[in-house]
Image (spheres, rainbow, N blue to C red):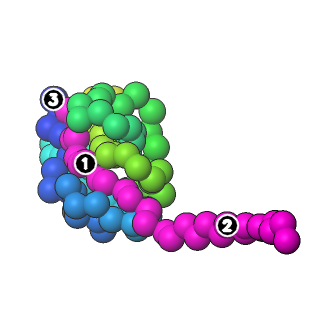
């Protein structure tokens, strides 16, 4: 049986809105596996709109939490595997924009010499 992609993603960070919060949690709905059961999910983060994650189970529940790097648009790619060995289509979700706006304080020390 062909599996549809996981659906209805919900994230702790709003896609397309830049934030300084680097920690993100994503949840999603499992696809209908018919008489089989979902064994787990392959999850992959990158900066591409479309990517097919590898065939390795990363999480067994429809949720993941990660910390994203500053200065990039990040996308998550998720697909499910059922216990019959079938992989679903891919859910591509994002982008998530991380902008760390921590203040950087620069101190300049100057010395001057005067000739009298």
Q: Which residue is mark 2?
A: 108
Regarding residue 29, the answer to whether it shows in the image is no
Q: Residue at x 15, y 29 (%)?
A: 2
* Label 2: few (<14), some (14–19) or many (≥20) C-alpha neighbours in 10 Å: few
Which secondary structure, mark 2?
Answer: loop
Q: Nearer the viewer, mark 1 or mark 2?
A: 2
Residue 22 falls in image quadrant: bottom left
Q: Does residue 107 belong to the magenta stretch?
A: yes
Q: Nearer the viewer, mark 3 or mark 1?
A: 1
Q: Residue 63: where, in percent of width, then height?
A: 35, 59
**Magenta highlight range:** 87-116
Mark closer to the chain start, 2 or 3: 3
Viewer-closest of 13 and 18: 18
Between disc 1 and disc 2, whose residue precedes? 1
Q: Quadrant of the C terminus?
A: bottom right
Residue 51 left/right relative to 58: left
> Residue 53 placed where, x, y %?
36, 31
At a point 45% along the width and 33% down the height, the residue shown is 56
The residue where tag 3 is placed is 2
Query: Which of pointers 2 and 3 indicates the residue nearer the eye?
Result: 2
Query: Is label 1 in a helix, a strand or a loop?
Result: strand
Gap in angstroms between the C-alphas marked 3 and 1:
27 Å
Could you say which disc has been placed on residue 95 in the image? Answer: 1
Q: Residue at x 15, y 56 (%)?
A: 8
Mark found first going from the N terminus, 3 or 1? 3
């Amino acid at each position: 049986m062909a599996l549809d992609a996981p659906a209805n993603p919900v994230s702790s960070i709003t896609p397309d809105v830049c934030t300084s919060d680097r920690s993100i949690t994503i949840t999603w709905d499992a696809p209908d596996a018919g008489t089989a059961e979902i064994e787990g999910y392959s999850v992959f983060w990158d900066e591409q709109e479309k990517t097919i994650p590898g065939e390795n189970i990363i999480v067994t529940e429809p949720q993941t939490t990660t910390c994203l790097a500053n200065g990039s648009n990040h996308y998550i790619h998720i697909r499910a595997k059922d216990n019959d060995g079938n992989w679903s289509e891919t859910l591509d979700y994002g982008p998530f924009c991380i902008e760390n706006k921590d203040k950087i304080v620069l101190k300049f020390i100057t010395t001057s010499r005067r000739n009298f």
